[in-house]
Amino acid sequence: MRGLLRVLTVAVMVSGCEQDGIAGSDGVDSGEQDGPSGPDADVGERPCDLTGRWIAEQHTVSVALGANQNTTNWFYYELTQDGDRFTATKALNCGFVVDGTTTVTLDDATLRSLAEQEMAGPGRGGTFTLSNDGQSCEFVLDRMYNLRGAAKAMYLTSAWNVGDPDKPLSEFPALPTSPPGMEDWDTDSMDGITLRSGLGNRYVAQRDYNEHSGRVPTFAAEFGGQGVISVVWDSQEGISTQTAPLLRTTATPAGNGWARYARADDLTVVESGPDAALQTCKNVQTLAAMTW
């Protein structure tokens, strides 16, 4: 049974990081950054205003044969707010780590490929509204759908684009298990994206969504946590036939997750170069570890 649990663990719907806590471990040197700095406490003049740079950390749980697999995702947002409505002018999906009966990892090539292109499109938004009593802010981050390792036009944007009504993943085209639907995003000559574990590699296409909501203090430079910001989410996976048969089982999402945010207007953001998004995401992960 223990061996079976270990096999099922690598079937989780996201990938992980090395033991230093950074997803993507090849040590890119961009030559133009000095590492992350701490969260910026300049929260502006309005009690509910998200304008600025933010990092976010999302926590969810999947189940494989009764065993919990705890997943952490990191995000980077540059937000502008007009009235109660905010919009992300820049967004990066900055990697994942899975903690369970084994560790699932991704390398730099995979993180680089996911950071900017897995989202359905730019312009994710939400609302940040002062409560009726003026003592807190109601936070809502609209749902975003993401795709990894498959043709985006066929398996994501043909069914949903930013601004469309929410829909369940069951209404999207079934994910592929081979080319041409699967695409080698991390250019390792294997289908889909590569998830690495001590038991072997899994070659997959993945699709998911998440949305966040909760009530937080006014003028907050940092907010969220378990029981504060709730995450509604779901995920699917298509597994390539290049994956060993024992590693072709997937895990099942288990209820809502939670998230937390920190203002980071002084974060070092690498703006140019082939690894700009990758290095910025590594800075985001490091800052998250320092903050939480």
Image (cartoon, rainbow, N blue to C red):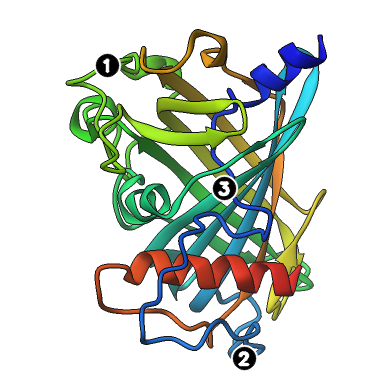
Query: What amino acid is found at the position of numbered circle 2 in the picture?
Result: Asp
For label 3, count other residues whose C-alpha is less than 10 Å away and answer few (under 14), some (14-19) or many (20+): many
Q: Earlier in the sequence, mark 1 or mark 3?
A: 3
Q: Earlier in the sequence, mark 3 or mark 2?
A: 2
Q: Residue at x 27, y 26 (%)?
A: 155
Q: Residue at x 79, y 21 (%)?
A: 67
Q: Disc 3 and disc 2: Cα gap in Å?
A: 28 Å
> Which of the pair 213/221 is nearer the observer?
221
On screen, residue 94 above or below 60: below
Q: Nearer the viewer, mark 1 or mark 2?
A: 1
For label 2, count other residues whose C-alpha is less than 10 Å away and answer few (under 14), some (14-19) or many (20+): few
For label 1, count other residues whose C-alpha is less than 10 Å away and answer few (under 14), some (14-19) or many (20+): many
- Point out which mark residue 178 bears: 1
Q: Position of residue 24 (x, y in %)?
A: 49, 55
Q: Residue at x 36, y 36 (%)?
A: 147
Residue at image mark 3: 96
- Looking at the image, residue 135 sits to the left or right of residue 279; the answer is right
Q: Disc 1 and disc 3: Cα gap in Å?
A: 24 Å
Q: Earlier in the sequence, mark 1 or mark 2?
A: 2
> Which of the pair 128/275 is nearer the observer?
275
Quadrant of the rendered structure where residue 48 is? bottom right
> Which of the pair 7/269 is nearer the observer?
7
Q: Position of residue 74 (x, y in %)?
A: 57, 56
- Looking at the image, residue 230 sits to the left or right of residue 183; the answer is right
Quadrant where the image shows the C terminus: bottom right
Q: Disc 1 and disc 2: Cα gap in Å?
A: 49 Å
Residue at image mark 2: 42
- Looking at the image, residue 54 sits to the left or right of residue 87; the answer is right
